[in-house]
């Protein structure tokens, strides 16, 4: 799996993605080409694998800090801490940064 610039996408890398307020930080937690993943919620992982919804050209990211799409509006579905996104020019690696949980 590669970024738009041709460099390899690694699990745990910190990336930025565009959001309505500008950009937000997240870490790569699952790769679409191999389904290789980090420590993500078992129920979410089971759903992704069972329904095969992660495209080969996409990754799953986990927000660092608050979710930029979080809301309290009951007329819309709640949002989680994970997002599917295509590995395109908008998925940008932050240089020399990886994130691991202790």
Image: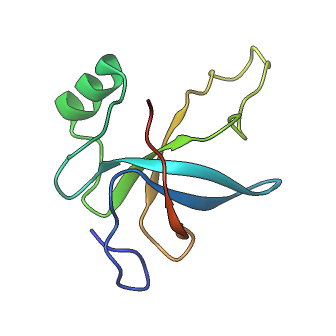
Taking the spot 46% from the left edge, 72% from the top edge, the residue there is 88
Q: Position of residue 79 (x, y in %)?
A: 61, 27
Judge left or right: residue 23 versus residue 61.
right
Asked which quadrant contains residue 95, the reply is bottom right
Residue 83 location in percent, x, y? 50, 42
The residue shown at (43%, 41%) is 100
- Front residue of this view, candidates 49 and 42: 42
**Image-based side of 10 in relation to 33, left or right:** right
Please say if 75 is above or below 25.
above
Q: Report the coloring of the rendering.
A: rainbow
Q: Position of residue 12 (x, y in %)?
A: 40, 50
Residue closest to the far bottom: 5
Please, which residue is most extreme toward the top here? 74
The quadrant of the rendering that contains the C terminus is top left
In this rendering, would 57 be left or right of 84?
Answer: left
Q: Residue at x 45, y 33 (%)?
A: 101
Quadrant placement of the N terminus: bottom left
- Identify the image quadrant of residue 49: top left
The location of residue 25, given as percent across then percent down, is: 63, 52
Question: Residue at the spot x=61%, y=61% of the render?
Answer: 16
Placement of 49 over or under 56, stated as above or below: above
Which quadrant of the figure has residue 64?
Answer: top right
Q: Nearer the viewer, residue 24 or 13?
A: 13
């Amino acid at each position: 799996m590669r970024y738009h610039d041709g460099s390899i996408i690694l699990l745990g890398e910190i990336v930025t993605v565009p959001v309505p307020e500008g950009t937000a930080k997240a870490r790569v937690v699952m790769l679409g080409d191999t389904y290789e993943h980090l420590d993500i919620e078992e129920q979410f992982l089971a759903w992704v694998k069972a329904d095969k919804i992660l495209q080969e050209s996409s990754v799953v990211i986990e927000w660092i800090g608050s979710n930029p799409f979080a809301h309290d509006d009951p007329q819309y579905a709640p949002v989680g801490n994970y997002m599917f996104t295509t590995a395109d020019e908008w998925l940008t690696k932050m240089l020399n940064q990886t994130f691991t949980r202790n």
